[in-house]
Amino acid sequence: MGATLTAGRSGLKRGRRRPKEAGGAEARICDAIRQAILERRLEPGTKLQEAPLGEFFGVSRTIVRQALRRLDAEGVVDLREKRVAVVARPSAADVRHTFAARRVIEAGAVEAATARAGRADLAALRKLVRDENAAYANGDRTRGLGLSLEFHHRIGGLSGNPVLARYLRELTLLTSLAIALYEKSGVVHAHADHDALVEAIAARDGRRAARLMAGHLDELESRLALDPRDGAPSLAEIFGRD
Amino acid sequence: MGATLTAGRSGLKRGRRRPKEAGGAEARICDAIRQAILERRLEPGTKLQEAPLGEFFGVSRTIVRQALRRLDAEGVVDLREKRVAVVARPSAADVRHTFAARRVIEAGAVEAATARAGRADLAALRKLVRDENAAYANGDRTRGLGLSLEFHHRIGGLSGNPVLARYLRELTLLTSLAIALYEKSGVVHAHADHDALVEAIAARDGRRAARLMAGHLDELESRLALDPRDGAPSLAEIFGRD
DNA sequence: GGCGGAAATCATGCATACACGATAGGGCTA
DNA sequence: TAGCCCTATCGTGTATGCATGATTTCCGCC
């Protein structure tokens, strides 16, 4: 906790800094940080200092600051007055709210997606799930998580609603932080659920797909140690007699 | 269209600029602009220049720029490279997506709210709806819209989920822009629906509340001229012989 | 008289400078 | 030697300056 980014162990993919490419610099930094969080290279609590980031990406603090502010608005960065920015450490309550919101939004998204998905979309979805299962079977957890993520994002895209898709992206990112913080056992993802989900979509059963999605997210949430008794023991538990 | 803000007809509430109050300056500007949009004092397309805004609020362009960027991220301001920022003018498709997202999110929110609302909450909700109806009966449309808005925000708050509440705020703001742009007849709000909604909540019937909310939003959307044929006639319609 | 183009003006994009507050390290004291 | 305070350093908050590109205006031309 409290690690600072350095040139060597920064956790950020070298952002081939082209000194001339202007405009999208902020987006580049945001994406790099988001990606690093998704891939668990950036842990919650990691300090994100403006100057080092700026030097790393070849821009001034101004741009870095804009990027950090944006990420703060998304809830993935904690930006407190006069204090160094850190990767957010959502509380257990935050995480529960994130999951509750995901259940609402993603159930709606998958219902819309069910109505809109075409033959090709279904095939792509099926392939995605197959690859995901294969990755887990091979023990390639990182790849599995990445594909699982893509599956959820794909649902957002298929919903045809950019607003829902955007919210979904935000929430999956926050979920990644939640997993990093509260993961209980080793394998956290109930990837088997995806199969059933795709079949419900293929069967054009939006209701069932929505229900399955909600259940899937419940399952995911239940694999996190959000309960106080799951986390660090309280003082009462430590010192309480009996 | 294309009006520029001036000291006189700015549409912004005089932001009693205390030169010393630092930190929350950006939030103050954001709130002022949001409020002005909600109250229809700022129309879509209005130019928002950094320097005049900065002078008005007593801060430098830096702060104004931060505020505009945040509002851009929320979709209420259109911020294009090297161009003056303008209040967003969502397309008909954007509006449809906004409403679709609202149906999903607000149905979920009201369902949660139904489970959580206490006696006092219900009383407050009832009073709100009563005041709203009274305002409309008195022909005070502005007040009616304000109370209606507060009703929806209250639902978000009662959901107990800050994430959903935040999304809801964003979407109601966008809805305000949508109404300003696409309003068909004079009275756009189906305020009668709120009564039924409150009763469903009071009856602890979350399903029905969610259904009513979705219907309410459908009704609202249907009162907008989102259909191409409702909007500006095409050249073919104007000049086409027939 | 209307249209087109060029220059001046204006507004934004970005970097930097300066000031304030936080943080950490060292020295002092008990 | 351990704990605490004071100071030096560091990092962020805001304003401003300069460069680039958009916009408008004015003049010449047809």
Image (cartoon, coloured by chain):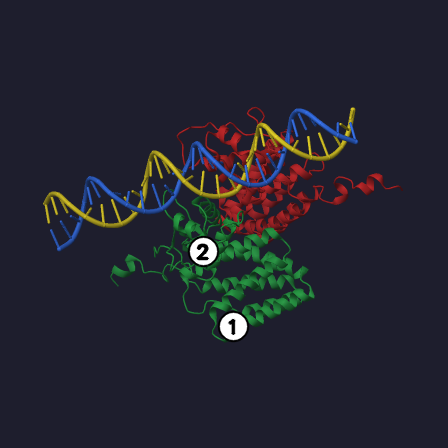
Chain colours: A green, B red, C yellow, D blue
Q: Is residue A54 above or below residue B89?
A: below
Along the line of sight, the residue nearer the viewer: B130 or A225: A225
Respond whether the residues carrying marks 1 and 2 are from the same subunit: yes
Instruction: Please state which amino acid type lies under the numbered disc 2.
Output: Val
Instruction: Please state which amino acid type lies under the numbered disc 1.
Output: Ala
**Outermost residue toward the bottom?**
A138
Residue A102 is at least partly visible in this image? yes
Quadrant where the N terminus of chain B is found in the figure: top right
Quadrant where the C terminus of chain B is found in the figure: top right
Q: Residue at x 54, y 35 (%)?
A: B33
Q: Residue A46 vs residue A130: left or right?
A: left
Q: CA distance from mark 1 to mark 2?
A: 27 Å
Position in image of residue A230 (x %, y %): 37, 62
Q: Is residue B92 above or below residue A169?
A: above
**Outermost residue toward the right?**
B242
SS class of the residue under badge 1? helix
Residue bearing the label numbered 1: A135
Which corner quadrant of the image does residue B22 belong to? top left
Pointer 1 indicates a residue of which chain? A
Query: Does label 1 or label 2 sit earlier along the sequence?
Result: 2
Residue bearing the label numbered 2: A95
